[in-house]
Amino acid sequence: MLNLTINNQPIEVTEGTTVLNAARQAGIEIPTLCDHPHLTPFGGCRLCMVEIDGFRTLQSACTIPVTNNMVVRTDTDKVKTARKFVLTLIFSERNHFCPYCQVSGGDCDLQNAAYGEGMTNWPLPPNWQPYPVDASHPNFILEHNRCILCRRCIRACSELVGVNTLGVEERGAKTFVIADLNVPLGQSTCVSCGTCIQVCPTGALIDRKSAYLGHEKNLDIQKTICVGCSLGCGIQVVSRNGQVIRIEGDWDSSVNSGILCKTGRFAPLADDRERLTTPLVRNDGALQPVSWEEALAAVSAKVQPADQVAALVSTRQSAETLHLFKHLFVDGLKSSMVTSLEEGSATTLPSQFAASKGKAFEGTLKDVEQADSFMIFGADLVNQHEVAGFFARRLMQNGALLVVIDTGENPLNNLANCALTPKTGKELDLLTGLMAAISRLGQNKAGFTGDAIAVMNAAAEISGVSTDLLLEAGFKFASTARPVIIYDAAHVQNLDVFNALVRLAEISGAKLVNPKGGANSLAAAQYNLDKPFRLNGHKAAYVVLGDEIPSERLVKALEKVPFLVVQASHTSKLTAGADVVLPVTNWLEQDGHYLNAAGQLQKAEKSLSTSGTDVRTNEEALKGLAQQFNLAAAGDWKAELLQRPSPVEITVQAA
Amino acid sequence: MTKPKVASDWLAGCAGCHMSLLDIDERIVTLVQAADLRATPITDLKEPDETGVAVGILEGAVNNSANEEVAHRMRSRCSVLVALGDCAVFGGVPAMRNFFPLDEALRRAYIETESTDENGKIPDDPELATMTRARSLQEVVPVDIFVPGCPPSADAIFYVLNELAQGRKPVLKDEKLSWI
């Protein structure tokens, strides 16, 4: 512990604490601009200058570590004059005219800092140099005129997301934030995660959807979780008058610590499908609006326990809804074809393996965050589960290695140290070859039986991946301390390949991580909603589609069903062909629990109100139907989550 | 003791700051009891007294020779000059024009606007004021008190004027200094 005084107040801090953080711990305010709690200190804006005894000049509090018996002053005239001078220089450098900026009036760190110092004007005239505006990106605009070169966006792009699209060119007053080698953002390597917008202290990065729609103090902000995929990232839903205007990453979330991907941040706002607002029943060939009671009666008239109804549910639904769905169709209507829209593609094999082992065997996203080498087996971490891809990318710039195994073109191939492309269907041979290579190199943490060289040669021959590549990949992957295999179960064709993957993990000492599928993929698997969907003379089908977009395959498969009920929030090809359509809430309008890929149970909060409309939550709709059948109440959804052995340790203690 | 005289005028602005001044509502009574409101855009007198006023208030940026004249006249006739609103303090919205050449701005305003017919032309009467770069008031004359905001809140304006009427120099800070 180190002792220091700030403004004569004695403070004790741990070694390595910066003066700025020491001041914050003691509740002493030091204004900052370039500093951000989730980014490394930079010392670029000079606003946090403080006076320290023994130093000839003022020092930036964000970068200077505390030493024992340091004497710091933050409120002297020298400091205050310096702050005003720094702000004057920043204001006059580019064109900071508050009246026409969307963040002016409380949301701008620069304006707040100036008002905080009691500045009513700045004595240096601005330089009136117009700077370009980069509006080439579909989601946001980079307005260089309002940029203060604090480099928060650049640090976020590199330290948090690991993408490194943003950087600077030139020096001094000519410094400019650029994308890649100075190309328009829309044509750059930007992955549209939007983290830069979230950290920008001024109005330089403008979110196209939410700019000018209101100051933060007038907006409704609800913390919840994203249901875009099974990672369960923490988000903040920013809305006004019941309309979502922006989604931000939740800095306090233990899953994603603030970062989000394009699916989490921008996709929900781009949804322009037409909403369903009233129950519809097909009458004389056309869907006619009816009341909920009539619609539910129409369903119960046609759907009977003896009829063999096929039932499908979206994995975007909460555990409560999934549980009720299972109770209604399996226990109540005695249907044999009850499954999720995902049909267990991301969970069946691992669940079977866990059942045979009787215990959890998978690692979690936390292992990904701490890994020093990655093997990606078929997983597409750019278009799905992208935040896990960001974790890998940011570790890779600190030296973590990446081996990609994919029969096709994997989007991370260009970043891989080793990209193995086996012939389709020959993944098993490749994995065997890799195990042989690892044991041949003496890097194996578990025994390998057989003649390694012969196995390797045979594997190379069949899979089409050379022995040199096998050895290189094997060495890179297995020689590290914390290797992680991220696999996509949908890419594992059969149990043999799966067993080989597990064996490879044992031999290389790696953790096996399955990012799974939809938001509640794991919960659906735990409720046994993971069968392949087959229609076999079913007279009726019930689809809890929710806000999911139905696949062409599903629409086609259900075309021939005599009686189709769809519970959905938006119109789609599926609802167009349905006999009864029940209008329900989307993910933001209902609450419930989600079991993420790491087995952590999280609660999604209701962020938007549906009062005044005729839509019901998915859970309410199913409850209404259960009443029609006079079904007894369902059991405990939480307890039933734990009944089946899970591939990953499940923590039901909701965070 | 005689009441201090106050005069105001507007330059290249939108009159919004004077509207905000009227937003002080019934407190204007307190103000006229404490001060003598002379030439303002909302009273009948058109020029500040030649004998001088205690407080001069100007709204708007300086963007032509006529504005310059008004600014100089006000400065020469008042003891304390107040720059009211972002245009007077920083240049504000009129200063957006500075990022374009003058002829381009004039062409856009008088010829290319959607509501202009084919007869639109840039006014060229020799009696018209000459356009200049849009400037903040302090670039033209010395300013004593700055009241930023677009517009400044009625509370801030009342506070400033009331302090001046009481013979004190107003200091805007904390909650009085916020931009809404």
Image: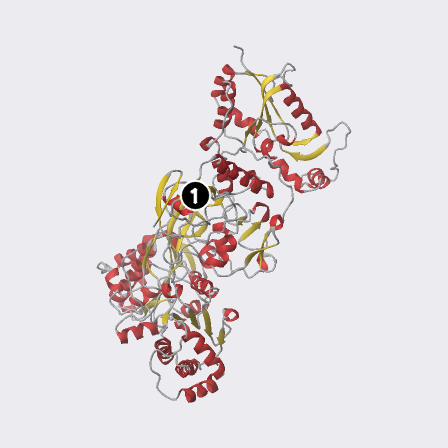
Q: Give the percent coordinates (x, y) of residue A561.
A: 38, 68
- Chain ID, mark 1: A
Please say if A172 is above or below A549: above
Q: Where is residue A590? Give x, y as percent.
A: 35, 53
Report the amino acid beneath label 1: Leu
Residue at 44% across, 39% down = A74
Position in image of residue B42 (x %, y %): 58, 21
> Is A411 left or right of A254, judged from the image as shown?
right
Given residues A135 and B138, the one toward you in this image is B138
Q: Is residue A175 above or below residue A162?
A: above
Q: Nearer the viewer, residue A505 or A655?
A: A505
Question: Given the current orientation, which residue lies at the most extreme front position?
Answer: A54
Residue A585 showing in the rendered view: no
Pick the residue in front: B43 or A393.
A393
Quadrant housing residue A332:
bottom left
On the image, the x and y values in percent for residue A642 come to 25, 65
Q: Is residue A406 left or right of residue A252?
A: right
Disc 1 secondary structure class = loop
Q: Residue at x 52, y 34 (%)?
A: A119
* Left/right of residue A382 with respect to residue A92 in the rendered view: left
In which image quadrant can residue A297 be found? bottom left
**Callout 1: few (<14), some (14-19), or many (20+) C-alpha neighbours within 10 Å?**
some
Residue at image x 56%, y 42%?
Answer: A90
Furthest-top residue in this view: B1
Q: How is the image coloured?
A: secondary structure
Query: What residue is shown with label 1?
Result: A219
Residue occupying the far right of the picture: B126
Quick one: quadrant of the C terminus of chain A?
bottom left
Q: How many labels, in total?
A: 1
Note whether residue A243 is visible.
Answer: yes
Front residue of A330/B40: it is B40
